[in-house]
Amino acid sequence: MLPSFDPWLSGAVAADVALASHSGHRSLRLRRERRLSNLLVSATRGSRLYRRLIGDPAGRRLQDLPITRKADLMGQFDDWVTDPVVRLDALRRFVADRSHIAEPFLGRYVVWESSGSSGQPGIFVQDATSMAVYDALEALRRPMLRSPMQLLDPFCLGESFVFVGATGGHFASAVSVERARRLSPARARSLHSVSFLQRADRIVAELQALAPTIIATYPSAAVLLAEEHVAGRLKHAPREVWTGGESLSNAMRHFIHRAFGCPVTNSYGASEFLSLASECHCGRMHLNSDWAILESVDDRGNAVPAGETGATCLLTNLANHVQPLIRYDLGDRVTLRPAACACGSPLPVINVQGRSDDTLKLCQPGGQAVSVLPLALCTVLEDDAGLFDFQVVQESPCDLLLRTGLCGHDADVALHRARTVLSAFLEGQGAIGVHIHCRSHAVMTQGRSGKVQRVLAFDGSTRRAPAINVDIRRSPVPHPVVADQPLAHPGEAGGPGGSNDSKATAPRLSTRNHRPGVSKRATRPE
Ligand SMILES: [Zn+2]
């Protein structure tokens, strides 16, 4: 079955996104206010949970509404969603089968899951409007890195895109790539995913064979690939590298850029909102404030002034009405920048302090050290061992400490299983003879983001990930946009108001395809 996709709706949303990108602050504010009003009405009508939390939304200010958190929402999932036929037990069965990746749930919803870096996995259901918004934001707000070339190839028919990341589950990035492949068979040959759970030499071999012009991946994986290129093992070099999902420091960016000799662009997204922000030509991260509201707050939930970094941020997703997220604690530390950007965009500039885990360099008998990507290691522990509350500390080139905050018998069982899974994974990576020590009831070390740093490298003789945080994207990595998607010309449509308005506004569609080839990212779990 084809993934759900509404070309008329997508055209209308794309036209509005294009118009909003060049509008003023007042126009953005009006869009935001109208969409927030629609969302509150829709959420309190359709969701029993939000009816209890908010009551009558008339006259309520966003900042006075209660803060919501993933664990609470997931615990009341069937009351949370606005479509009563969407049930958590059915969704769990759906995502348990990996053959369902990018299949429409109930024939109309896109589904992905987030891993539980905060201890609680989530499942997120997207309706057609949400997907139209994510596609349009990704396609139209990402800077064109090679304008002259794109003028010669407006349909990007010569581009090939590879996502390197977690491919074996219903993660947003993997789902996005697979969805684009299914919706556009003509482009499927140039859209690929490569699992980062493989040994580095196998990842290199796949990339060598696919020879992508664009690689989208996590910063740590991009650094690894750049190292492979410098060492001469990866001969191929892409024309662009897109990163997301982790912190990208200046040092990492420059290394990747120098190694491949190509531009590197970063973006910020989450399973809860795929395309929150992307970089402009000036290297600043612009929030898509016409479709998402981010409030930076202190640890009591009070707003912090612009220019100051909050303890966390609250997301209100203005696009998704089937699983509303209103003042949702996203867990990222965000700074809203008061000054305008030199690029002239009316979209506000933000800085995000995100996860910054280390790539491990582990011993290999008689050979060079084996690099193990932190997100690959986390994926194995979460998906194969079912352990979400953990930290891995490298104590020497051949010694790892796996610790958890769990206690008692549960901790013993979980650690035993995790050690077995991790040991097998490391051996598969070529890291032989690594000793894994376990500890329960542990106090975790927090990183600069305020979150637990889950993977810490040995800082004696190994390289640690550069410490400067720039902008990050939390979960998703840029994904390919739906290729061959008909888009309304900006001048052809009045543009949808809220998601409901866009269904009623059927613009005349253009056959123009904006930035095909690729458009969006994958996600790895938060
Ligand atoms: Zn800018």
Image (cartoon, rainbow, N blue to C red):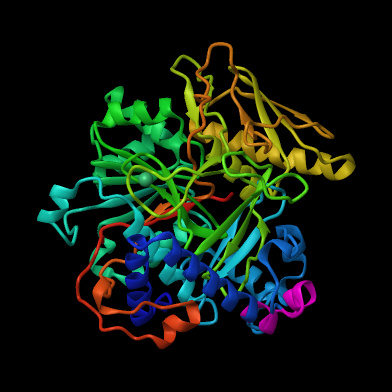
Q: Which x, y percent locates residue 130?
A: 48, 70
Specify the quadrant that holds the N terminus: bottom left
Which residues lie in the magenta part? 42-56
Q: Residue at x 24, y 46 (%)?
A: 213
Q: 76 or 191: which is nearer to us?
A: 76
Q: Which x, y percent locates residue 332?
A: 62, 45
Q: Which x, y percent locates residue 342?
A: 34, 42
Q: Residue at x 20, y 71 (%)?
A: 512
Q: Residue at x 45, y 57 (%)?
A: 288
Q: 331 or 368: which is nearer to us?
A: 331
Residue 170 in view here = no
Q: Describe residue 456's horizontal placement relative to residue 414 as left or right.
A: left
Residue 275 in view here = yes
Q: Describe residue 31's horizontal placement relative to residue 57 as left or right.
A: left
Q: Is residue 156 above or below residue 399?
A: below
Q: Is residue 191 above or below residue 459?
A: below
